[in-house]
Image (cartoon, rainbow, N blue to C red):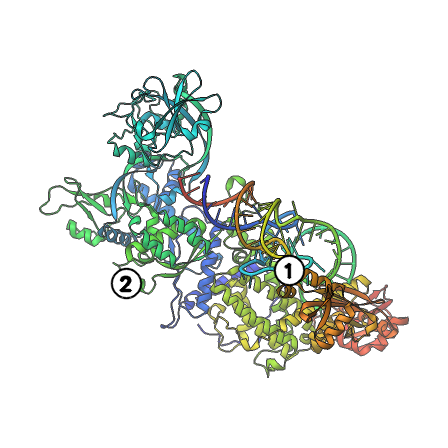
Amino acid sequence: MTSPPSARATYRPVPAHVDLPVLEREILDLWADQGTFAASLDTPADAPRWTFYEGPPTANGTPGTHHVEARVFKDVFPRFKTMQGYHVDRKAGWDCHGLPVEIAVEKELGLGGKPDIEAYGIAEFNARCREAVVRNVDLFEEMTDRMGYWVDMSDPYRTMEPSYVESVWWALSTIYKKGLLTQDFRVAPYCPRCGTTLSDHELAQGYETITDPSVYVRFPLTSGPLAGRASMLVWTTTPWTLVSNTAVAVNPEFTYVLATDGTETLLVAEPLVAKALGEGWTLTGEAFAGRDMERWTYQRPFELIPFPSEAHFVVLADYVTAEDGTGLVHQSPAFGADDMIVCKAYDLPVVNPIRADGHFEDDVPLVGGQFFKTADRVLADDLASRGLMFNELAYEHSYPHCWRCHTPLMYYALPAWYVRTTAVKDRLLEENAGTNWFPETIKNGRYGDWLTNNIDWSLSRSRYWGTPLPIWRNDADPSKIVCIESLAELSALTGRDLSDLDPHRPYIDEVTFEVDGEAGTYRRVPDVIDAWFDSGSMPFAQWGYPHAEGSKEKFEQAYPAQYICEAIDQTRGWFYSLMAVGTLVFDQSSYENVVCLGHILAEDGKKMSKHLGNILLPMPLMDEHGADALRWFMACSGSPWAPRRIGHTALSEIVRKVLLTYWNTTAFHVLYAGTEGWTPTSGEVPPVAEREVLDQWLLSELHTLTRDVTVALEKFDTQAAGARLASFIDDMSNWYVRRSRRRFWRGDTAAFATLHETLDVLTRLMAPLTPFIAERVWQDVILPVTPDAPASVHLASWPVADESLIVEGLGARVDLARRVTELGRAARAEAKVRTRQPLRRALVASGAWQQLGADLRAQVCEELNVGSLESLADAGGDLVDHSAKGNFRNLGKRFGKETPQVAAAIAAADAGALAASLAAAGTATVDLDGSPVEVGPDDVIVSERPREGWSVVNDQGETVALDLELDDELRLAGLAREAIRVVQEARKSSGLDISDRITLAWSADGPMAEALRTHTALIADEVLATSITEGVDVPAFTDADLGLSFTVTKA
RNA sequence: GGGCGUAUAGCUCAGCUUGGUUAGAGCGCUUCCCUGAUAAGGAAGAGGUCCGAGGUUCAAGUCCUCGUACGCCCA
């Protein structure tokens, strides 16, 4: 792409008023027409690479505003790095598989669980899942495009593509060969509605607070020393598991005591007597060590199901605690991981009366066919009716639910495939130690803790729409297993060409093979895998590695990533699966820097949700405020790590304070530079050192800004970058432009050059954050007048701060001038003397007067409309009162404990003498309890104020005093200013262009007439009058307060 | 129950790393001013137990301990 050859060396007009959403649509068209994104990827072959991985959104449902958040961060840094000269590939990706998609399709089709799906047909069901994903991808693409997120959506990776599936198979077979993919019978959280176990990170997303019955049940002892005369008291919050009660566990180290209320005797762990039993119970004095109670038998609470072998006795288990309950823990191995381990050790049977759909087997008395949770009530009532219920309470706790369908989970014993992540736990911890987390607390906090407590990854899912587990098992000898890594390998095993096979269920299920010399047929195990494994495989699977042609080269130059970014809920999701898969397969984590965002909340501080009606959708938000405003909010408003509230107020404030202020400054520049026909190449530009102090200041601030913004973005700190940019824009508009307006009106080359250079750099600094408005400004203000400029700001280079233009101390001096100006304005307001009325002089404290220097004093005079700015001290010592107080910051270092006394001594001293001594000798002496203490200028803050007859404002050590005395000269000058103002208003209301010349005719009496006669030249200059004549018959404008009538005619 | 985070004006948030005199900004509100780029800008005002309690220190919004509330995560 090159600059348009026909470019005339002149600015394009920039309208003062702008409709940002319309502007953005035009820019989108421009980018599309010019192929700007593609051009930004067309870097030199030797450009360093900066690798970014797109975490694939699950394409179920429509995109929400929270999706914009991460996508802003995924866009800002690649744009920033691209401008710095890096090659930053951005391949879009879509997470296509998994339960969320299945659930959505089930709903659409009105299906109610696995049996319905199988009746409907797996082939057709999966086809519907594929359709649903494609449909939602369209909506995400629209939003992605609109917000200006540059990511290559023309060639995305999709986890359902055959090449992707084959890559995942390859990874699994690699893990299998390392002996880390194993099958085990384990108790796992299981959703009976979805018919699948949930992985630990899925489990983490579904805790909900619910109220369960908390039951204390009598278990009468039937052997041992207490047989027939006491009951164990057992506590559980899952009465439904009592049906399959198998044993009672006690801690061998605990002491268990007998307590009685006079009618019965109960056995409870000693520390829990009061908590479990309450009032009215006394200890009998009998006590047993837990280890001595082993194998005491008891009467089980329900006799509803048969047991195949001996059970129902006391077992020992170290995990029993004394925190809750009674210290006697009911065991049901099919429904508890700990229970399973303990009962296996005692060779107890695993009895499970509950079907895979979460309902009791139909032939179980009392609760047959009931949903497990529903059975709680029936069972509790039955226990009560048989006198076994000691106590029942409502127990509120958080209990895991299915993160998608909200069904309460069962812990349920099932055969499952596991990735033995615990075998690489140390490597994971090492890799994490080398990863930069933003914010840093996640690294050793939330994420580090998670790794430290790592458990094996439960990989298999008994579902349909997912990557099929690539394991074939011999039906004659189930110990014989083949884990394949590609369709090619499968073709070789079957002797059929399967290269075009859809690797999904049910097609893959039909592939079987035999092995020469072995009995039996190999059939695939029916499971699919956790979709998190899919997304965690994207660093290589996005290229079809290692099968696809060219994938090795692509992978090797893009692993690991320098940068990934998602919201904090991915800590145990993608952040984990990405690191785990990388470490398992390549022994190296797949990312170096990870930015972890807080959640976006609605304006009311709550999560956006349909039923609260507080949802703000991204497309309408961008249509109203513009994508730049939304991007700025996401990147720069508040801390990205913290949860943040979004609303219309915040967005329109960004538009007004940041975007429009920036826009208006460019419009201002183009208006006057255009009027003068000025461009950067139209003539000699004075070197910076020869320009006015304000020019030097603006450029000094600009290069400081460049340095600061660069540093901030290198640290992924968009908030700091945004704060610096916003304050610079404010300074530029409300001090530099405001103070320099006259120079622009008069066509001052140095002013044009300064503001043009500033807008050039500023626009590039803004480009990653607000790519639309920055592009518009580039197109209108930079491109047309800059030979060889890149055709887009996004193809331009990132500015590098020119340290030689950063003037040490100048910023502080200008700040002082602004502060003095503020004080002067306050003094005027207090004295009710409007700014238009010139005053003879203003006085400031001598220190400030010296620091400002002549040039800034002139600025202050102009801004305050005073004749001169003088030092209070020079105005006459007698007029000035001094006051002095200690500077604690300095004194504290010198005097420590004596600081208050020294400060008091300074305050008590004669301030005038102190100031005189400091001014003359640079040091002074104060009296501290009779002994002299020497203090320097840094130890004392001296302020000055005049004694009387002045309008004085004093703040933070600075003082400004206005001389309010008016003489005729000042009065006439004030009236002339009034006249100028009303004529300017007349010009404006007559619709004259700012450069139109006029003739002015006027009538007035008395002082106003005198003022007009005296200041004719000034007025002519200000209002661009070619002639001013006295006397007008039919005035077009009259100001009664001023006694002035006049006509304005275009010359 | 455990871990982490947060708590500053009516609202949204800076400031806390490195303790210092009278704690800031924007929005909103009241009054006034300015306007030849601005949907802007300026001045004044109302509005603060810097969550609470202890502690360290000459000095605490800032450091330490404990607690409270809220959020997230884990159990």
- Percent from the top left, x then y, of residue A165? 29, 52
Q: Secondary structure at mark 2?
A: helix
Please rate how many residues cluster around mark 1, counting C-alpha atoms within 10 Å: few if below 14, some from 14 to 19, many from 20: few
Mark 1 on the same chain as mark 2: yes
Chain label for disc 2: A
**Which residue appears at 29% of the width and 26% of the height?**
A313
A445 or A414: which is nearer to us?
Answer: A445
The residue sitting at the bottom extreme is A684
Three-letter amino acid code at disc 2? Lys
- Percent from the top left, x then y, of residue A36? 45, 66
Mark seen at residue A552: 2
**Which residue appears at 39% of the width and 71% of the height?**
A43
- Percent from the top left, x then y, of residue A653? 61, 56
User: Considering only order in the chain, which callout, 2 or 1, is on the residue closer to the N terminus?
Assistant: 2
Three-letter amino acid code at disc 1? Lys
Q: Is residue A213 left or right of residue A492?
A: right
Position of the N terminus of chain A by quadrant = bottom left
Chain label for disc 1: A
Mark seen at residue A897: 1
**Which residue appears at 42% of the width and 52% of the height?**
A138
Closest to the camera, between mark 1 and mark 2, is 1
A1022 or A591: which is nearer to us?
Answer: A591
Question: Mark 1 to mark 2: distance in Å?
Answer: 69 Å
The residue sitting at the front extreme is A930
Residue A754 placement: quadrant: bottom right
Q: Looking at the image, how many numbered discs can be counted on the residues?
A: 2
Position of the C terminus of chain A by quadrant = bottom right
Q: Is residue A597 left or right of residue A487?
A: right
